[in-house]
Every structure is written in structure tokens, then in C-alpha cells.
Image: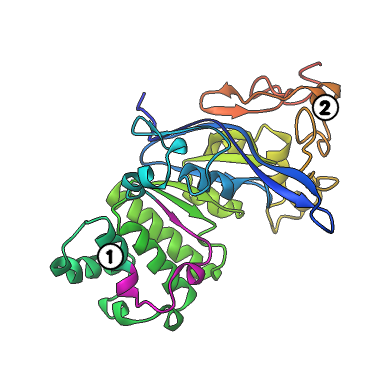
Amino acid sequence: MTAPLLSVRGLRKEFPVRLGAFGDRAATVHALDDLSLDIVEGETLSLVGESGCGKSTTGYCLLNIQRPSAGSVVYKGTDIARLDDEAMRPFRRDLQIVFQDPYSTLNPRMTIGEALSEPILFHGLAPKAALPERLRQLLADVGLSERFATRYPHELSGGQRQRVAIARALACQPRFIVCDEAISALDVSVQAQILNLLLDLQQKYRLTYLFIAHDLAVVRHISDRVGVMYLGRLAELAPAEALFARPLHPYTRALLSAVPTTDRRTATTRQRLQGEVPSPLAPPSGCRFHTRCPQARDLCRTAVPALREVAPGHATACHAVTSPTATNWEETPA
């Protein structure tokens, strides 16, 4: 098997917070809990789940933008989760990110050309004399003409700004890019253009993506594999087609059931989740989904289910699932 580009083991992230009117109570937000996965070079691994489930935190921890509380992120044989800012600098070239809101990540006082030149000069990727040609190539890669180099962010549309944000990530000649809700703030027609752009760039430069999104239709279109997260843990991890054809975890089935459709028969058989997502300040014991799961039993309330492979490449964290054909308590007695 090909060695993974990134290997994540036992990743945890906790945020200390102060509660109460005067901040007199200390508490901890458990954002990630024992997350383990491998990301293969050239693939697109998507993370989906409700808001607050830890998708973005996972991306930030993989890039060491936020330092994990525990666990490892191994890249090129080095655990980058333990590196300080100075030691991380050589790895920043390879590991880039595209944020949801490009306007907030672009300096309004810098032209597009200056914004794209900054990482090139910082990492010493080209001499100043070669910058004009390098900028033309970057802008052409994302479908913009060279005249955009003299413009400011406020002069661009949302889709154009996101193209610039992608070009800035490409400026470092990276191997791995985290796309953190990179299209969710765009119009639907523009979303399709940016998606196709990401796919074209992946083929051209052999890029690897961690694609974070809410829109399952988009995820199905762009992904090689999909990870479903719930309250800081992976509920299911599978090849995209296998997951959409036969979801195994009750939470995954509920998410897919909620996808909008014009089919009345599908609309009347939706699996609607009851209750609210528990607080990450005090996550439930056992399976974190048991408070909303229609199949929950006593075992679910006390024992944390391991993420187990039940079919080739298809893993799920559910006590009720032991194979692709045994997916409920009736088939799998407690």
C-alpha cells in the first residue's frame, strides 16, 4: 500500500473557557476526541457533519494552526503537531489552506499582485525579476487575467476573491490544501465553477485536499472518501460511492435523508433526528450519538464504540454494525 501523505493518530483538541457572568467557572470544550485517519496523496477526503462537530478544528490541527492537545500528525516522517512556529516554517510551503471568507483573509491595503507575491518571496521560491511571470501563471491557473494583479480585494466579486485565495495557496507550490467551507459563501453557479477549478488544479498539480463542507451533493461530486463527524469523533469513514450507496451509521443515514429532494416518497420517509446536539462542554458518555439515536441501547450509553472496518475501506463507529448487512439491533443482538 502507498504510504499516506498525512497520518493522524489519537488527535485531541480541548479549549479552556470561562463560564458565568463574571467568568468565575473554568470549563473545557472537547472539540476533538481520539481522531485517527490517513490521507493518501492525490485524494480528496471530505469531512461532513453538523456545525460544531469539529470539522474545521480538524483542518486547523492538521496544519498546526491550532496545536493539538494530544495525538500526532505525521508528515514526511515528522510529527508536526509538536513543532513550534519556527520549526513549522519549512512545512508551511507544503501545507496550505483556503478559508470560507476570502475577503477577511486578504489584506485590503495590498493589491492582488502584492498578496500573491508575499508567500513567494517569503519562502524564496522565485527572484523578484521572475515575479511578473510567476504572477501571470498563478492568475491564469485560477482563470483570471493578469490585469487583476493591480486590483484591490474590494474591487473583486466573491467568486473572484476566492480564486485569488486559491492562487495564494498555490503560490507556495503545496502538496496538501485544506478547503474549509471554501464554496459555501458563494452563489450556486459560482460554486460549480470553483469546484471544477479545484478538480482541474488537483489533476494538474497532483494536489491532495481535505474538503470541509455541509452540502452533501457537493461532497459526493468532489470526494474520493468521506468522513462523517459527530461531536468531535468520526462516526463513519468510507469511499464516497460506498457511503452514499449504503450508509451504515444511524447518524450518516439521517444526514443523507435530510438532503433536499423533489421525490415525495423520499420526503415522507425522512429519518428525522430528535433533540439537540449535546454540548461539547459535557459530551455524553459512551457513544456520543446515543442521546439522539433511535437504535440506542444500554451498551451505547456506557461503552465508546471503536471505529472498525466492516467492509474494505468502510469503517464505522457503531455497536450495532458488524457488517454491511447487519446494521440494526434486530440483526445484531446486544
Label of residue 51 in the image: none
Is 313 displayed left or right of 250 in the figure?
A: left
Disc 1 residue type?
Leu
The magenta region covers 96-115
- Quadrant of the image occupied by residue 198: bottom left
**Residue 207 in sight from this viewpoint:** no
- Check residue 102 for magenta coloring: yes
Q: Residues within 10 Å of mark 1 (few under 14, many from 20)?
A: many
Say which residue appears at 39% left-offset and 80% top-offset: 152
Q: Residue furthest left?
A: 129
What is the CA distance from the residue labelled 2 to the residue labelled 1?
Answer: 52 Å
Q: Quadrant of the C terminus?
A: top right
Task: Locate residue 135, reporting x and y percent.
Answer: 24, 69
The answer to which of 326 and 103 lies nearer the viewer is 103
Q: Is 224 on the left or on the right of 137, as rendered?
A: right
> Which SS class for mark 1?
helix
Q: Mark 2 sits on what residue? A: 301
Q: Amino acid at mark 2?
A: Arg
Q: Position of residue 106 (x, y in %)?
A: 44, 70
Residue 138's disc is 1
Instruction: Confirm whether the magenta stretch covers residue 283.
Output: no
Q: Number of numbered discs present?
A: 2
